[in-house]
Amino acid sequence: METLPNRNGGSRVQELAVLGQSIWLDNISRDLMNSGKLDQLIRQVGIQGMTSNPTIFEKAINGSQSYDQEIAFLAARGHNAQQVVRVLMVRDIRRACDFFLPVHKKTGGKDGFVSIEVNPLLAHRTDETVQEARLLHSLVERPNLMVKVPGTPEGMPAIEALTAIGMSINVTLLFSPDAYREAAMSYVRGLESFVSSGGDPSTVHSVASVFVSRIDTLVDRRLEELQKALPAEKGLSALFGKAGVANSRIIYRLYRDLFHGKRFAALKAGGANTQRPLWASTGTKNPNYSDVLYVDSLIAPETVNTVPEQTLNHYLDHGTAALSLERTSYDGQNPEPVRLFDRLDELGIRREQVFAQLVSEGVKAFDQSFETLTGALEEKCRALVPDGGKQYRDHVPDGDWKATVREMESRFRPEGIGVR
């Protein structure tokens, strides 16, 4: 295993790029953009993209007064809370895309992407997910946008349909190898349709967001229950904190088989891009584990790791830039990934049940964040516009949406670095 030295003051993130892995930031806020910190992270540290989700936006908008003027403006024009959220998200994502546009151009369109998620309340509604994704794509109007679509059974047809019209998609909330495979094949089928209609596959990109640390959190909790119930059972302690990375290794092998095999060969010859695995949920939640566990252990070519800002800081301080994911074992005590899950099955910790529970909890958590945000915005709208503004409307036509976004950008010019 070769570890790269930190040459010429270059950051570990830049060393990972040499190894074939891109680091994206799992965070967005106006303070991050206005302060110049995001510009520094791009130019000096070398981060190559950004992801967002309803929880991140809920913290950004509810935790700041920098949105209040725009909220009042939209409420006075009769937009309801969900519509206000959509416009505020679009505004921030458009600006973040502008920050990353030089990265997008420098990497030939491979990196520099910023992700915006469709309304999580639509996770089980295919047609409405497609409509929402198309609307967000038309409002952001940036070449380096990825629209996030959940990898639920209802989300898979939406992924295929959106890819078929040339849209770049970030498939989110993936846990199981089966769900990953279906997401990959949805992308491949969509690309094939796009090419058959005359589209250029080189213009379409995708990532498959595989959540990692949440698997360990749930499996570890089940193992703790077993230790209490079966104190004589041997070898349980060696299974803690292993399932998340093991699952990622299984999925990475699937990626290599799918995108470096015969099915994808014709598309690849025509310029198509692989759908890279993106390791998500990579902040360490268990204080007993290394705070860079889900960075150091997941390094492999043709992958992305989207990291919280705190995890990024830990990695810059004491992480290791070395290929690690495909090692035959983590250490002398750890089994191969398939055998690890077989052992968990034997103990009654069924992988299918774990993955199903995590998908359900993930959708529910994003739903809750979105509902918390819209509820807080409803109260803020009433406070900022005491008369309630115009009558709330259930629908704003697409043309009006674009006009509203453009008018807001002329009225509320952001300050600081990255203003276009």
Image: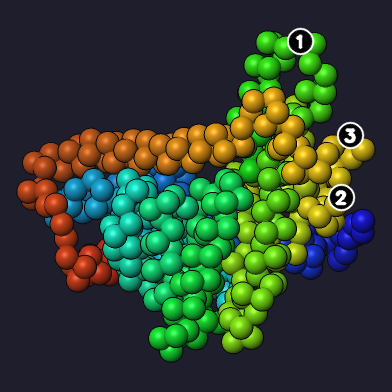
Label 2 and label 1: CA atoms lie apart by: 30 Å
Point out the tag, 3 or 2, that comes first from the N-terminus.
2
How many other residues sit within 10 Å of disc 2, few (<14), some (14-19) or many (≥20)?
Answer: few
Q: Do the residues bearing badges 1 and 3 touch, measured as CB atoms within 8 Å?
A: no
Q: Name the residue under label 2.
A: 328
In the figure, 315 relative to 99: above or below? above
Quarter holding residue 232: top right
Label 1 and label 3: CA atoms lie apart by: 20 Å
Q: Which of 203 and 105 is in front in this view?
A: 203
- Compared across the picture, whether 359 is left or right of 311 comes to left
Task: Locate residue 73, reporting x and y percent.
Answer: 21, 54
Residue at 65% from the left image edge and 70% from the top image edge? 259
Secondary structure, mark 2, is: loop
Amino acid type at mark 1: Pro
In the figure, 63 relative to 37: above or below? above
Residue at 69% from the left image edge and 11% from the top image edge? 228
Whether residue 287 is visible here, answered yes or no, is: no
Residue at 57% from the left image edge and 34% from the top image edge? 354
Residue 333: which disc? 3
Task: Locate residue 402, reporting x and y percent.
Answer: 25, 69
